[in-house]
Image (spheres, helix red, strand yellow):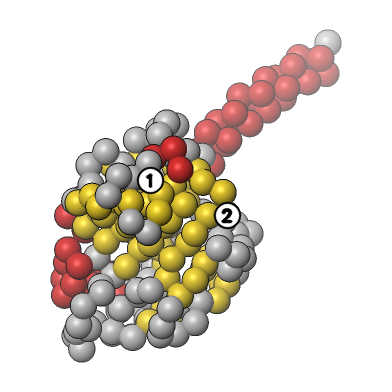
Amino acid sequence: MKKRIMAAIIALAIAVSLPISIINSFASALPDSLLISDCDTLDGWSKSGGNALTINSNGFGSGSSAVACDINSGAFRTAQYTAATPLDISPYQNIEWDVMMHTGAQPGMWEEIAEYYGDEVYLKIGSSAADYNVYRLSKMTVEQDAGNNLWYHFSVDIDNPSSTTGSFDMTKMTIFYFSTTDGAVSSSVRNGHI
């Protein structure tokens, strides 16, 4: 009888703890958000100038990869992801993505980028090169990861862009472009990695 009671208690503990651990694992991916993640190849990525893109095995989360680039004076630009097939983002309220920014193992690069480039930082999403929305830093939510101070979580409200060009079709998103500045670089921002 004691064995049956102990087995029932263990089964109940497993049944309760498993859903809780799954919920905690996916807490950052809200139902109304599209999380851009798991960039384990350069398929779809292009960069027209500066340092080349690479794949870094230090992606956000266990066993994931990230698109990486050495950047000078905190200037990350000309890198664009173009989806092979259009993505319908109309069911979502937000687009979220994670970025590691550092100078070696030292944090602080994002703070310098935000201070010296400000609203030059932007995300562009589009259905074509002529039809897109732009979200400047003032429209972004940026949070430093509590577990690793080199990672930052970015989010934008899809319905609240800084500007629009053409007629962006949210049922056919193909372009994702994140830039820290397209203008002149500041020598006050250190070289590093993104």
Q: Which residue is mark 2?
A: 84
- Please give the name of the residue rendered at 25% of the width and 52% of the height, measured from the top-left corner: 165
Residue extending furthest bottom?
A: 187
Q: Quadrant of residue 182?
A: bottom left
Numbered label attached to residue 133: none
- Specify the amino acid type for callout 2: Ala
Residue matched to label 1 = 95
Image quarter in which the N terminus is found: top right
The answer to whether residue 25 is seen in the rendering is: yes
Left/right of residue 121 with respect to residue 85 in the rendered view: left
Q: Is label 1 in a helix, a strand or a loop?
A: strand
Q: Earlier in the sequence, mark 2 or mark 1?
A: 2
Q: Is residue 58 visible?
A: no
Q: Position of residue 41 (x, y in %)?
A: 62, 65
The residue shown at (20%, 83%) is: 184
How many neighbours does mark 1 have within 10 angstroms: few (below 14), some (14-19), or many (20 or more)? Answer: some
Q: Nearer the viewer, mark 2 or mark 1?
A: 2
Is 103 above or below relative to 10?
below
Question: In the rendering, at what x and y percent does residue 183 appear?
Answer: 21, 78
Residue beneath the point at 72% across and 24% down: 10
Q: Is residue 4 left or right of residue 22?
A: right
What is the quadrant of residue 70 in the picture?
Answer: bottom left
Q: Nearer the viewer, residue 4 or 121?
A: 121
Residue occupying the point 17% across, 63% down: 119
* Residue type at tag 1: Ile
